[in-house]
Amino acid sequence: MRSSEIILDDKQEKSWLKYNLRRMRSQQQLLWMSIPFVIFICIFAYGPLWGWLMAFQNYKPGVSFFEQEWVGLDQFKMLFTDPDFLRVIRNTLAMSLICLILGFVGSIGLALLLNELKNVLFKRIVQTVSYLPHFLSWIIVTGIVADVLSTETGIVNVLLTKLHLISEPINFFADPKYFWGIVGFSSLWKEIGWGTIIYLAAMTSINPSLYEAASIDGAGRFRRMFSVTLPGIKSTITILLIINIGNILNAGFEVQYLLGNGLVQDVSETIDIFVLKYGINLGNYSFATAAGIFKSVISLVLIFMANGFAKSIGEERLI
Amino acid sequence: MKVLLRKQTLGDITFSIINGLVMLLVVVATLYPFLNTIAVSFNNGIDTIRGGVYLWPREWTLQNYVSVFKNPHLGQAAFISVARTVIGTIIQLFCTAMLAYVLSRKEYMFNKFVTTLFVITMYFSGGLIPGYMLIKQLGLLNNFWVYIIPGLIGVFNMIVIRTFIQGLSEELIESAKIDGAGDFKIFFRIILPLSKPVLATIALFIAVGQWNSWFDSMLYAAGNRNLTTLQYELMKLLSSATSQGGSVNLDQYKNVTNLVTPVSIRAAITIVTAMPIVLLYPFLQKYFVTGFMIGGVKE
């Protein structure tokens, strides 16, 4: 039976139900294939949404769901008056923005320079090496960061001391003023190479005659890079920037959790760590759920705004 | 760049030299920490503390690795890591591909509904606490399957595979249907074999994700020491090292030798954990670069 070619005739159209039953029978194998996955997503992705009700309760473990005490918006009120929560929002936004800006500037810069390399072998070596950290877990990367910055044997302290820029080794992980920078550079180190792939792909579609024309007009290589290559990947940059803006509140857990410690927690804790701490570690489920809802809602608003913006400037939309 | 260029000016040459130096700096900055970690992992732990071990071990020893492998927890953790990577990759790849096939069929009557149902989850989720309570209620806490089941479908991966399947010849599927083949048969006999390139790429992404994952281990399986993964064990060592300024609880290693230190043990575990990826990396690189390109296709 060619299921795609069932055509309604007048009599069948009267019986909508009959038609759909026939359609279901004709594609029953597709239905059997998809049913388990629909059940799966309903349980694992939509099921937890029931848990949002906890944010309006004073949830106590061991008491049945319907016998919990309802407290309305109290948890949210507590959340927004909690100085810790305001601090973790600040930290999340600050570190996300630092990583976003460093990542963009770094990847675009590296892609531009890679594009100018004429020696194919050297270019391939640089690319291969710079992609590698992307495939390592944050656990390994933070371990490496800890080694590089260690007070006794870390290469950064050794170099700074030998160059006489500092007299005493710096304990980078004990001073809050270094933490955001450490997070920013760790992310840069891990993702800079991977970030270049898409820009390099975009650069291959730039018309070579543009370079020729610029060259005849007397533009040097630096000038061509700025006036031909960079405008050529502008739309790629825009669309990636928009995608990333939607994720700004999501980008803050692994590094901060792994590198943070008691001495720098004022600047290292993000919303996700806050939720983990109050929810799982302290068992304050309702409060932590309220914080989680806040994050989800803001993220969704950011995504829709970014999406609308993308449409308004004529870029392909994301959703 | 095959551009007809005029004679190189002094500025162009300076640019090339500076560019080359910057690239060299990138390579060194990326590779040095690895090479240093390898050197430290093969160096006598006590000697390392004196400093000055850079790219080559000063006092060679295998003690660090011996301590790592003699630790019964780490052996078990390595086994769990391998098991979740192999089982997780196979099952997730299969499920993701099957859903991708269904959603690539235009005649499938719930196509739009099911696609939306899955795509929404890319942007929206219940959050950590409700998710944790669900896992608890389902009895998946401290259960090996918590590593496999919740991630059964990767929505982004599904879209990539679906895009690939949609690019395959429609006539092939139609003619198979005329010959009486059902969708199951078409999926197993035609779609899966023809999708090998994209499936290899996605398998690689899933496998790297499984191998590197640690948060689920910490959250859902930390109560059962037999279920923790290598990454999680490494994390515990590292976090106790950073928060206490370098002093790791080394009791579990003391029985082997007193020549190992927190720094040298950490280096050895880092290398053991990173090695599978670093060794496979050169062979797989061409796959994930093409994979990224395929993935760049818009929904």
Image (spheres, coloured by chain):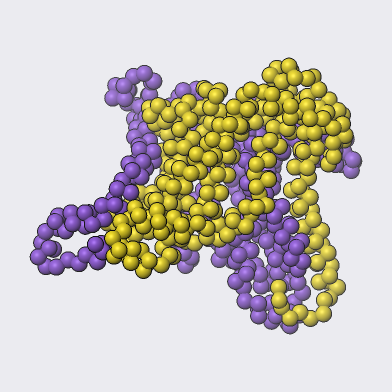
Chain colours: A purple, B yellow
- A242 in relation to B149, above or below: below
Position of the C terminus of chain A, as image quadrant, is bottom left
Quadrant of the rendered image containing residue B23: bottom right
- A4 in relation to B121, above or below: below
Residue plotted at (17% across, 66% down): A8
Would you say A227 lies left or right of A275 here? right
Position of the N terminus of chain A, as image quadrant, is bottom left
Quadrant of the rendered image containing residue B43: top right
- Decide which of A111, B65 is in the foreground and name it: B65
User: What is the x, y in percent for residue B104?
Assistant: 37, 59
Quadrant of the rendered image containing residue A40: top left
User: What is the x, y in percent for residue A318?
Assistant: 45, 58
Q: Is residue A77 visible?
A: no
- Decide which of A275, B69 is in the foreground and name it: B69
Residue plotted at (56% across, 28% down): B228
Residue plotted at (45% across, 33% down): B145
Residue plotted at (21% across, 65% down): A6
User: What is the x, y in percent for residue B186?
Assistant: 36, 57
User: What is the x, y in percent for residue B264?
Assistant: 77, 29
Would you say B265 lies left or right of A297 here? right
- A208 in relation to B99, above or below: below
Q: Is residue A21 visible?
A: yes
- A262 in relation to A221, above or below: above
